[in-house]
Amino acid sequence: MKVSVPATSANLGPGFDCLGLAISMKNQVIIRPSKFHSVSLKGEGSNNPALKDNNMFISIFNDFYHNLSHKKRFFRFEFQNEIPLSRGLGSSSAVIVSAIASAYAIEGIKLEKDKLLNLALAYESHPDNITPAVMGGFNVACVQENEVKYIRKEIPKTLKAVVVVPNRAISTQLSRKTLPFKYSKEDTIFNISHSSLLTAAFMAEDWDMLKLASNDQVHQKYRMKQMPELFDVQKTALKEGALMSTLSGSGSTLFSMAHTDDSKNLEKALKLRFPHFRVFTVDFDNTGVRIEI
Ligand SMILES: Nc1ncnc2c1ncn2[C@@H]1O[C@H](COP(=O)(O)OP(=O)(O)OP(=O)(O)O)[C@@H](O)[C@H]1O
Ligand SMILES: N[C@@H](CCO)C(=O)O
């Protein structure tokens, strides 16, 4: 059985904790029955011993599997990770979503995507990452009485994501601690208006509106101060053809969106200016979690 989940970019500037989209960088796990428990890791995080000994996937999988099954079975888990860890590309959401989906699938129990999304919410309280991880595409989401309410839109194939991934990890928990406790009325109104405009721009496919609409006063400037070079990355991306350029999730990745025809030049300019960072141009993902039995 194989489960794959895409990376995500949350917030998209002003849409703090409510806007997010899915990117075609995937974490995949193949699970086979085995005589004993074993794990193999390839790709991102494969040199991190904590992922073998104390893996978040295994512990969430076990929580669900032991509830769903009365049989004592062992499995071999083969992970192939494309999503960099703690870089703001939804690595934790991907793990949560794939672990829950796998526990149901291995028992042959059908799990609707809406139910999967709400089960994932218990482990990741920000719906802007888990919603696109499950559903794919662009999503506006909010939580009401422990349920995610969302509206989704496909992202056209004529657009690409260009992501700049710094070598420094930033944990979401710590990154949230850098944010102010209270915001002014001006900053609040600024973000509501820009986030609304950004959502409308995605829905109407009005890509020229993204540059203005993706401005934010609530989180990026506080978080990016921890790594000031990110301001240069953002400025360079916008100068070199990006339609928008925003801190991805809680950082440290900078996410940019571009027309396919402009994306190669953008990638080249970013690689030239920031040779010490990894730069990837990837498609958007409109599928979300995929399960193959
Ligand atoms: N492939 C993986 N296998 C096991 N655990 C992982 C994996 N990827 C991430 N994790 C867990 O998730 C943690 C990172 O979560 P965190 O929320 O800080 O980052 P993120 O999800 O990449 O960022 P963001 O939520 O801003 O998009 C890691 O420290 C690790 O515990
Ligand atoms: N909206 C979340 C995304 C990371 O989970 C944040 O910015 O902290």
Image (cartoon, grey):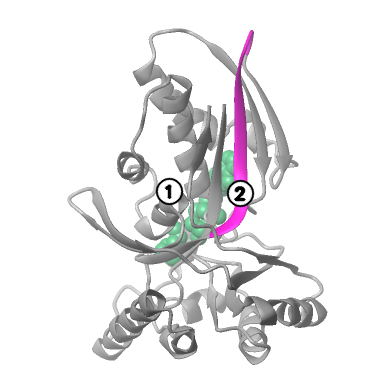
CB under 8 Å between discs 2 and 1: no
Q: Is residue 9 magenta?
A: no
| Above or below, 19 relative to 235 | above
Q: Which residue is mark 2?
A: 26
Q: Judge from the rendering whether residue 198 lies leftward or rightward of residue 174; answer left or right.
A: left
> Hey, which quadrant is residue 28 in on the image?
top right
Residue occupying image coordinates x 57% and y 26%? 1
Main structural element of the magenta stretch: helix, strand or loop? strand
- Earlier residue among tags 2 and 1: 2
Q: Foreground: 127 or 132?
A: 132
Mark 1 Cα within 10 Å, few/some/many (few <14, many 20+)?
Answer: many
Residue lying farthest to the left in this orientation? 145
Name the residue located 30 percent from the left edge and 86 percent from the top edge: 193
Assess disc 2: are there few (<14), some (14-19) or many (≥20) residues with their C-alpha within 10 Å of its C-alpha: many
Magenta includes 27? Answer: yes
Circle 2: residue type: Lys
Q: Residue 195 appears at what percent x and percent y?
A: 34, 79
Identity, as a three-letter code, of the amino acid under mark 1: Val
Q: Which residue is mark 1?
A: 134
Span of residues in magenta: 23-36
